[in-house]
Amino acid sequence: MNAPRPTPAKLRIDGATKYYETKSGLVHALEDFSAEVRDGEFACVLGPSGCGKTTLLWSMAGLHSLTAGQVLLDNQPVTKPHPEISMVFQEANLLPWRNLQKNIEFPFEIKRQNPADHRDRVRQLLQRVGLDGFQNKFPRELSGGMQQRAAIVRALSLDPSVLLMDEPFGALDAFTRDEMNLLLEEIWLETRKTILFITHNIAEAVFLSDRIFVMSARPGRLHRVYDVDFERPRDLSITTTPRFFEMVNEIKAQIDHKVTAPTKMRAADAA
């Protein structure tokens, strides 16, 4: 078994608390969530539906403000989208009127960078995920798995130090999902990016991660942290081992699906 690596924190979440105002009252999404993600670590977040996983991830990406608490990247507060942080969403979100190459180049255009300066890197990434030769294809001509591969290439093309992934394989069939998990681990082993990956699939989290953060039901708090010490590189055979089943069942027993009702209070009280 591999011993945990004594690496410093890349991302730190300190007391993350979030309220959303709705017509029926304030929804208490997160409450005092604190955790650290180590530099170069592959970490997963698990929890019941509605526990605030996506809210947490979007806050880490600088896309949502927190009601209280903060997110730190290399000890600096993240208050807006950061050039060192890229995100892969639940859906590939490819623009249907752009071909694959133009979709991948879109972030460079937003940042007012010349896409031509990055084409060698993009081409290498496309080769790595098996999409070289599909540059002129439109999203409608690509399978779901191919679209998600393109989304990963788009995120990595910016060469971020942190990759946030919000259930990116949830809509894929089981076989394609297994292929994507293997591919993602290979890319991580090659790049050693810091990855935080959200999933509802406990087996997926155990297969992919170094550590798993288990959240409570809403409002989401950090309930428990699991170290995953299966040796790398991993293959699908570990999913049939007794230790794998034991860990999946142990984590499953820790997930609480009880959800609190919307908080009846004024928005000003949450500020």
Image: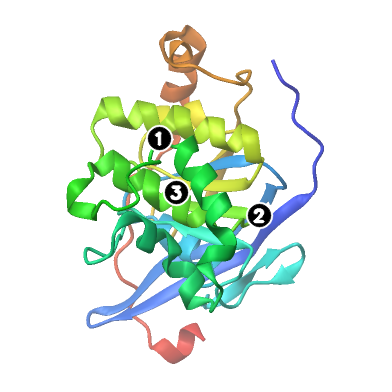
x then y, percent, for residue 255: 41, 39
Pointer 2 or 3: first along the chain: 3
| Residue 176, disc | none
Secondary structure found at label 1: loop
List the residue tagged with mark 3: 152
Query: Mark 1 or mark 3, which has the lower sequence index?
Result: 1
Residue 232, compared with residue 11, is above or below; it is above
The residue closer to the viewer here, 162 or 223, is 162
Name the residue located 74 percent from the left edge and 30 percent from the top edge: 4
Say what amino acid the circle numbered 1 marks.
Answer: Gly
Residue 161, given in percent of the width and then of the height, sits at 66, 54
- The residue wearing badge 2 is 161
Q: Is residue 167 visible?
A: no
Q: How many marks?
A: 3
- For the residues labelled 2 and 3, the Cα–Cα distance comes to 14 Å
Amino acid at pointer 2: Ser
Q: Residue at x 69, y 66 (%)?
A: 72
Which residue type carries mark 3? Ile
Quadrant in the picture for the N terminus:
top right
User: Of 8 and 47, which appears nearest the observer?
Assistant: 8
Local crowd at mark 3 within 10 Å, few (<14), some, or many (≥20)? many
Which residue is situated farthest in the left direction here? Answer: 140
Residues tagged 2 and 1 counted as in contact (Cβ below 8 A): no
Circles 1 and 3 in contact, beta carbons < 8 Å: no
x, y percent for residue 130: 40, 35
Which residue was labeled with disc 1?
Answer: 130
